Image (tube, rainbow, N blue to C red):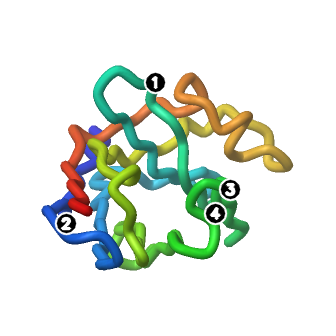
Amino acid sequence: QVMLAESGGDSVQAGGSLRLSCVASGYTYSRYCLAWFRQSPGKDREGVAYIESNGRTRIVDSVKGRFTISEDSAANTFYLQMNSLKPEDSAMYYCAATLPTLPPDNLCGGGYQRDFGYWGRGTQVSVSA
């Protein structure tokens, strides 16, 4: 059974940093995409960072240069390092992982929610001005 569990959410002031962690228990696929999504009240859930099993990463423009995604495969854990946080980064952050059904040249699919079959319950990030 696959379970994802996030941690690291907190309340910080603008300009601060946080590192979110996601432990992916039971997730043993050799080809995969791991991602961080976020959702704030009244808004759709959006993907912010992706990392593939081949090491390729993608960061969306709204957080590029401030957020990085990484993984420690030996620990079945991946991370979202968030620097220079802004109030608009406040959201519930979710980690997600794909089922092994996507082709090797497109491991994250379109990066949409529907491409990810496993989800954590979320960790809250609040950034005050």
Q: Which residue is mark 2?
A: 8
State the separation of the CA atoms marked 1 and 2. 22 Å
> Circle 2 sits in a helix, a strand or a loop, which is it?
loop
Q: Is residue 6 left or right of residue 46?
A: left
Q: Point out which mark residue 53 bears.
A: 4
Q: Earlier in the sequence, mark 2 or mark 4?
A: 2
Q: Which residue is mark 1?
A: 44
State the separation of the CA atoms marked 2 and 4. 23 Å
Q: Earlier in the sequence, mark 4 or mark 1?
A: 1
Residue 117 drawn above or below residue 63: above
Q: Position of residue 112 (x, y in %)?
A: 61, 31
Residue drawn at x 23%, y 55% is 125
Residue drawn at x 71%, y 46% is 107
Q: What kind of residue is marked 1?
A: Asp
Q: Which residue is mark 3?
A: 61
State the separation of the CA atoms marked 2 and 3. 23 Å
Nearer-the-camera pick, 100 or 57: 57
Q: Earlier in the sequence, mark 1 or mark 3?
A: 1
Is residue 79 shown to the viewer in this render? no
Q: Position of residue 59 (x, y in %)?
A: 64, 60
Q: Is residue 93 left or right of residue 64?
A: left
Label 1 packing within 10 angstroms: few (<14), some (14-19), many (20+)? few
Question: In the rendered structure, are the residues bearing label 3 and label 4 in contact, judged by CB atoms less than 8 Å apart?
Answer: no
Is residue 4 shown to the viewer in this render? yes
- Foreground mark, 2 or 3? 3
- Foreground mark, 3 or 4? 3
Q: Point out which mark residue 96 bears.
A: none
Residue 78 location, quadrant: bottom left
Question: Quadrant location of the C terminus?
Answer: bottom left
